[in-house]
Amino acid sequence: MLYGSNEEYKSLNQCAIEVNNTYKQSISKQGIDQRFNTQSVRFIKSLFEEQLKNQITSQISSELLNMFNRMLVKDSTKFDIHEQHKAKYPGSGGSASKAGMCIQLEFDLKNGAVSDLTICPSTRQDSTDAKETKDKIEKDDLIIRDLGYFALDVFEHIEKCEAFFLSRLEPRVLIYQKENGNFTHLSYSELYEHMKELKQSTIEINAFIGEKKKMPVRLIVRLLPEDAYNQRMRRINKLNQKKSRKTSDKYKEYARFSFYITNIPFEKISATQIIDLYRLRWQIELVFKIWKSIFKLEKIGKMKLNRLLSLLYVKLLWILINWEIVVNLKSVFHSVFQKTLSIYKSFQTIKDNFEKFRKELKENKIRGENLIIWMIEILSEKHWLEKRKNRIGYEKIVLMYL
């Protein structure tokens, strides 16, 4: 009906023909359509949740990782669906569809396990998700978040849980310093002149954020190189032109920096290490790239909701199983070969060979364990991660602090 390697969903009539050709069973397209119901959604979702709960993980051990219980990164991806589903899955409208879905993904960098994978309407904001899932935080967790999840209330909750946060600073949030018992705004222009004069690219400030809360944080400031600053300004000016507004002088001053906030004690991790640690976030962006470019997750045509959800959970289940295989092999290969397995290349090969796997498993030519052996053999050849200029990989950051 739907296979992990497919870039497009098959029509009900195509499915009926394939069932007849493959299993010698005659069924009409109406008969197949009837089998996509609430029970099928519940069954496939239960398989997906069972796989999510029973993942086998393998850790890369280092001093950097071992100081935390879990290292959780989270992001979301949104895609349009047919507007017939706008009542349950409303979209943003405008030039986009009136109906849309959002997938929230969170995984633990320490052991590779997916800790949350939720389907929700595309109108649900990331900041809302941060607030509604905060009760899942455990003691000594490190929560690494992008700007979309920024919420001061959540950071306060993380501290109450005796856990840690690391985030970029939302531009609209005010920064204060305390002098002689009085709070004063941090001047971006003075900060820029100070760092330029001392030729410092990174400094740390004991700061307070939020006009009302005045929450104490470690503020790590990185001064952008001039070309990076100009690139950022070109991007924001282009965006503001589309919206018929002018870039403010205050933002021009702010844009010279990258600001990071955390409550991790200085004795545990230095300011430079904080920036390295935040770079690990790009791993989750790689996951979404794989989902979209290899598995075509967002390619969904017009169909009834129960069929859509059934097919989506099947595809997510297939992705999750492959994710577990590749992440664990990545850890083993790193230990044995001292090389880094490319997740992207590995998923591409598994996807390209899916029909072979399915056929050979169905005909009992190979057993499951032999299939894993085949994967080990093929992935250990020509599937290594290539070094990229100006990019520090996950393992390199981790191994810095062995």
Image: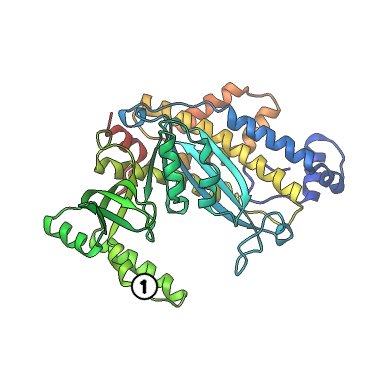
Q: Which residue is drawn at 62% across and 49% down?
A: 120
Q: In this view, does 287 lie to the left or right of 230?
A: right
Q: Which residue is drawn at 66% across and 45% down?
A: 312
- Is the N terminus in the top left, top right, bottom left or bottom right quadrant? top right
Q: Where is residue 247 in the image (x, y as percent from the top left)?
A: 36, 72
Q: Where is residue 297 in the image (x, y as percent from the top left)?
A: 60, 49
Q: Is residue 207 left or right of residue 117?
A: left
Name above or below for residue 87 compared with residue 297. Answer: below
Residue 50, visible in the rendered structure: yes
Q: Residue 120 versus residue 181: which sits nearer the camera?
A: 181
Name above or below for residue 231 compared with residue 381. Answer: below
Inspect the image, locate mark 1, and give the three-letter code of the amino acid beneath it. Answer: Thr
Give the residue at mark 1.
247
Secondary structure of the residue carrying numbered label 1: loop
Q: Which residue is drawn at 39% across and 51% down?
A: 213
Q: Residue 69 versus residue 370: which sits nearer the camera?
A: 69
